[in-house]
Amino acid sequence: MMIDKLLRCFIVKILMISFLCAGFCNGIEKKSSIDKEKLKKRVELFLKKDNVTRRRNVEDVFVLAEIYEKEGNDKDAMFLYQEGLRVNSWRLDYQLKLAQLMYKYGDKKQAVEKVKIVCQYTEDEELLIKAEEFLSNMGIQPVKSINKTKGKLIENPEMIIVPIGKVNKRLLLEVKDKLQEKMGISYSIMEKEINPGKFDRSYLDKYTIDTKRKLLVSFLRLIPEQNERFKELENQGQFNASRLISELKEKYIIEEGSKLEGYLGITREDIFSGNSNFLFGWAEKNYGVMSYHRFLAEFNREPPNRTRLCNRMVKQGISSSFFILGIPRCTNPTCIRAYPHNLTEHDQKSNELCSWCKEQLKLYTGD
Ligand SMILES: [Zn+2]
């Protein structure tokens, strides 16, 4: 009886860990190892299915479309991009590819419409640049163009944004402009990002917190497919926000009497501190760090929306900026600075400061 119970418990744990890994490692199948004939058969089947089943298997269609495009078979590529986008129209990378083919074959109106949508919604800097280049080659100005000289290091800013690792710099410019507008103080962005080094905690570390789990993982690693998944988890992880703040402090010293109030590091990667599972931001007087990892559509499996991403970042940026200025958190639940337990609470906060926070900011800026 006891052995039965132990065995059941063991199997449940294996299934749970496999499930967790599967969630993290979606798309692990390497494009290079794709068998085109098998893929074609799967796509043929796809085309006979209902929309729900199609949506689940849509990746195959896009991959085959890309293969056709590379082979110069534009007609079949366009057909498959269209079929894929019918059930997942938010794949903006493929919207751009289809638009480029449409333009090539004379459908300028639809192509432009598609590319404008990509420009407006994408959260990916490279895709945005490609889409804008495409529009500009057609002699069309993007929907919302950002002044690229804006945001760079100006003389005597009150707050300096420091990119940590590879970040979306165009997005940072949008965030910086909004922060400046809402806070009424001057921000600028450091031209060069700092290198944060290796992750302080991998996602695998998070799941092997005790000896039992470690043993279980070592056992599962004997299975090649599971081992691949664990390798992926080892390569993804989080930075320790306290360490990043210490590095900012060491690198950038604020001189006595300077107008500069502090440094706000921004990273795309996930952050934590102490025993916390994750953090949106972490700050103290003069120095702070925030992460937009958990604000991304990709992380939350939402359709991309750069305006939403920017708003989420501005809310966090304001919270962090207040701490950098040395103003403690207020107690108003609807204030933009209220402590959010999760993303839903973060999204639910208003976009405005409460009267107490406004007063504190006025005292600081002297307005
Ligand atoms: Zn407040």
Image (tube, helix red, strand yellow):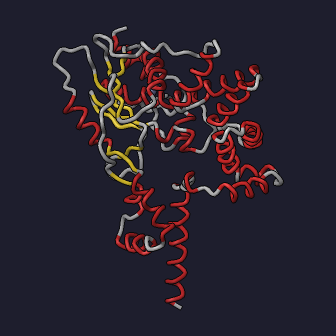
Ligand 1 shows up in which quadrant of the image? top left
The picture places residue 231, in percent across and down from the top left corner, at 42, 60
Question: Does residue 48 lie above or below 8 as drawn?
Answer: above
Q: Identify the residue at image location x=61%, y=16%.
A: 137
Left or right, residue 307 beside residue 323? right
What is the number of callouts on the image? 0
The picture places residue 340, in percent across and down from the top left corner, at 48, 39
Question: Does residue 223 lie above or below 136 as drawn?
Answer: below
Q: Quadrant of the C terminus?
A: top left
- Between residue 66 and residue 160, name the one nearer to us: 66
- Between residue 150 and residue 334, name the one nearer to us: 150
Question: Does residue 25 lie above or below 92 as drawn?
Answer: below
Q: Identify the residue at image location x=76%, y=20%.
A: 109
Question: Does residue 203 lie above or below 315 as drawn?
Answer: below
Query: Where on the picture, by quarter, is residue 148?
Result: top left
Query: Where on the picture, by quarter, is residue 308?
Result: top right
Left or right, residue 127 beside residue 53? left
The picture places residue 260, in percent across and down from the top left corner, at 26, 17
Residue farthest to the top?
A: 367
Residue farthest to the front?
A: 72
Left or right, residue 39 beside residue 221? right
Q: Identify the residue at image location x=79%, y=49%.
A: 51
